[in-house]
């Protein structure tokens, strides 16, 4: 669980997911990745007896995720549940993911976009749909929500798919997993508003798209150069102009 200044929510989120996992009979361990928090996040987590790992270098989702995978691989777990600390993800949806694990899938994504989420603007919703279509082209399979944070990752995916992005991990992990031959599934989830605070992921949808497309250009050039212009050309130019 990555966290940055989530003192108002993190105890509740951890407790909810621990209770749900315990009820499902899972043998599990919670790990929190502290991304340079300046509030009481670290202290609260340590009071719960949960290990806290610190992002050593630059802040941001990609750096936090690399630290998270390193910490997860140091455990003996076969699968890793990645969930945000802001309370938007519902612990009761965990059983949907586990059903796909039992079917042998390696990367299971929570699809928020099967409906318009109550806390998401139409502009952001359409941007997410567009980006997911581009990721589908790069991955070679249909991905409905490539930006989702709620996901289960197999140890094999974590060991094989090294994240190189400078901004976000969400799309890159999907594309690399698909190219490596891993099985990917999606399950429908519903998200609510943050329990407290504001998202720090994006200043605006256009800023987010521009940053993500920079990472996608590098990824496409590495894995699927023939799709680079088709997938990112006009969209990237349009996003940068608007940004």
Image (tube, grey):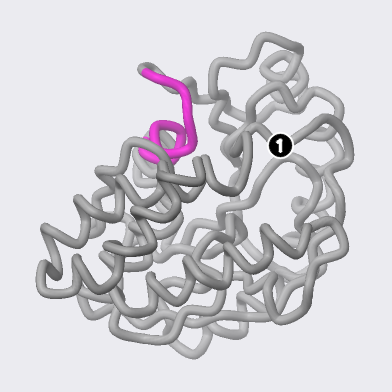
Which SS type dominates the magenta stretch? helix
Q: Position of residue 116 (x, y in %)?
A: 78, 72
The residue positioned 73% from the left and 73% from the top of the image is 189
Whether residue 2 sits left or right of residue 222 in the image: it is right
Quadrant containing the N terminus in the rendered view? top right
Whether residue 106 sits left or right of residue 147 in the image: it is left
Q: Position of residue 54 (x, y in %)?
A: 48, 20
Whether residue 165 sits left or right of residue 220 in the image: it is right
The residue positioned 71% from the left and 40% from the top of the image is 85
**Image quadrant of residue 34?**
top right
The residue segment tinted magenta is: 58-66
The residue positioned 65% from the left and 65% from the top of the image is 26
Q: Position of residue 181 (x, y in %)?
A: 23, 80
The residue positioned 60% from the left and 38% from the top of the image is 202
Q: Is residue 175 above or below residue 39?
A: below
Q: Residue furthest top?
A: 38
Residue 60: in magenta span = yes
Residue at the disc numbered 1? 199
Q: Position of residue 47 (x, y in %)?
A: 76, 19
Q: Residue furthest bottom?
A: 103
Whether residue 140 sits left or right of residue 190 in the image: it is left
Residue 97: in magenta span = no
Q: Secondary structure at mark 1?
A: loop
Q: Is residue 88 above or below residue 13?
A: below
Closest to the observer, 163 or 96 = 163
Closest to the observer, 187 or 240 = 240
Estimate how packed mark 1 is, as few (under 14), some (14 to 19) or many (20 or more) residues with alpha carbons within 10 Å. Answer: few
**Image quadrant of residue 214?**
top left
């Amino acid at each position: 669980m990555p966290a940055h200044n989530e003192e108002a929510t993190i105890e509740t989120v951890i407790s909810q997911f621990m209770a749900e996992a315990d009820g499902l009979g899972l043998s599990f361990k919670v790990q929190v990745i502290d991304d340079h928090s300046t509030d009481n996040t670290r202290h609260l987590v340590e009071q719960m007896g949960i290990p806290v790992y610190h992002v050593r270098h630059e802040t941001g989702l990609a750096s936090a995720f690399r630290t998270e995978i390193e910490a997860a691989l140091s455990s003996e777990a076969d699968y890793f549940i990645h969930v945000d600390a802001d309370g938007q993800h519902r612990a009761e949806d965990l059983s949907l993911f586990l059903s796909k694990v039992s079917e042998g899938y390696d990367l299971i994504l929570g699809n928020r976009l099967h409906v318009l989420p109550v806390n998401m603007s139409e502009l952001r919703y359409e941007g997410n749909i567009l980006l997911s279509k581009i990721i589908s082209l790069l991955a070679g399979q249909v991905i409905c929500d490539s930006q989702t944070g709620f996901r289960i990752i197999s140890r094999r995916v974590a060991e094989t798919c090294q994240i190189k992005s400078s901004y976000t991990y969400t799309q890159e992990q999907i594309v690399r997993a698909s190219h490596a031959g891993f099985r990917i599934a999606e399950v429908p989830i519903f998200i609510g508003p943050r329990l407290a605070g504001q998202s720090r992921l994006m200043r605006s949808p256009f800023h987010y798209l521009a940053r993500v497309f920079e990472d996608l250009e590098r990824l496409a050039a590495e894995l699927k150069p023939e799709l680079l212009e088709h997938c990112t050309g006009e969209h990237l130019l349009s996003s940068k102009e608007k940004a």
